[in-house]
Image (spheres, rainbow, N blue to C red):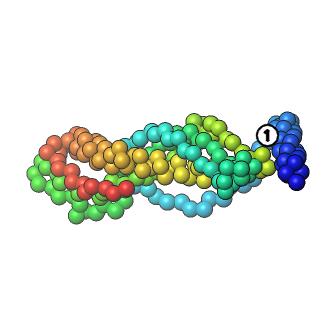
Amino acid sequence: MRTTIIAVLAALLIGAGTASWIMTRRPSGDTSIDASRDAVVKEMRSLGRLETSSFSIEKIIEAKKDGGGPWSDILFGDKLLLIASGEVVAGYDLSGLSEEDFVRSGAALRVSLPAPEIFSVRLDNEKTRVYDRDQGLLTRGDKDLETEARLAAEQSIREAACAAGILGEARENAVKQLGAVLGALGFPDSIILSPDGTC
């Protein structure tokens, strides 16, 4: 009985190994991409953004689908290592400013800005890549695993930028840039106020 079980397991492993070897030896062929279909504009918006800070961040993300145990992982597991490179941009949305936000007193102008905010978190597709991927012997892998890893990478890069003080940097840069512009316009003693932003 024991030898029968061992023989069945050995046959399964040999069969899975052969199938895996055949799949890796298939000719890949050239990729064909057709982008000639019409594009549809879904939305157009007028933006009043002042971008004042940009952080470039790299992060290593490990994503895996557990098979349910050591042997199941060998047969059905799926794991990948993603090296993610991205950019986080922060600044000010000036579209909500009104006349009340500008108070003039002689050669001084007091400007009340809104809180800084993160505008975008973007992965650089040229630099972001799957470094390694291990799949079980009896699985073709989860087709959504890389997508999930990329989403996790975006969130992790955003959190890293927040922890590194991107909103404080955005505020400092805005005060310097707007102060220089207002000084050139004849308001050298301008005061620029901005509350702290929250990530």
Residue 114, by quadrant, is: bottom left
User: What element does badge 1 sit on?
Assistant: loop
The residue lying toward the viewer, choosing from 144 and 133, is 133
Residue ID for mark 1: 31
Is residue 69 visible to us here? yes
Determine the residue positioned at 29% across, 47% down: 168
Residue 127, given in percent of the width and then of the height, sits at 57, 36
The amino acid on which the numbered mark 1 sits, given as a three-letter code, is Thr
> The C terminus appears in which quarter of the rendering?
bottom left
Residue 20, given in percent of the width and then of the height, sits at 82, 42
Number of marks: 1
On the picture, is 137 further left or further right than 181?
Answer: right
In the displayed orientation, state which residue is furthest to the front: 1
Residue 197, by quadrant, is: bottom left
Residue 125, by quadrant, is: top right
On the picture, is 69 further left or further right than 158?
Answer: right
Determine the residue positioned at 44% across, 56% down: 47
Determine the residue positioned at 60% across, 62% down: 42
Residue 154, given in percent of the width and then of the height, sits at 51, 49
In the displayed orientation, state which residue is furthest to the left: 106
The residue lying toward the viewer, choosing from 73 and 144, is 73
Determine the residue positioned at 49% across, 52% down: 155
> The N terminus appears in which quarter of the rendering?
bottom right
User: Pointer 1: residues within 10 angstroms few (<14), some, or many (20+)?
Assistant: few
The residue lying toward the viewer, choosing from 81 and 150, is 81
Is residue 36 visible to us here? no
Residue 41, given in percent of the width and then of the height, sits at 62, 59
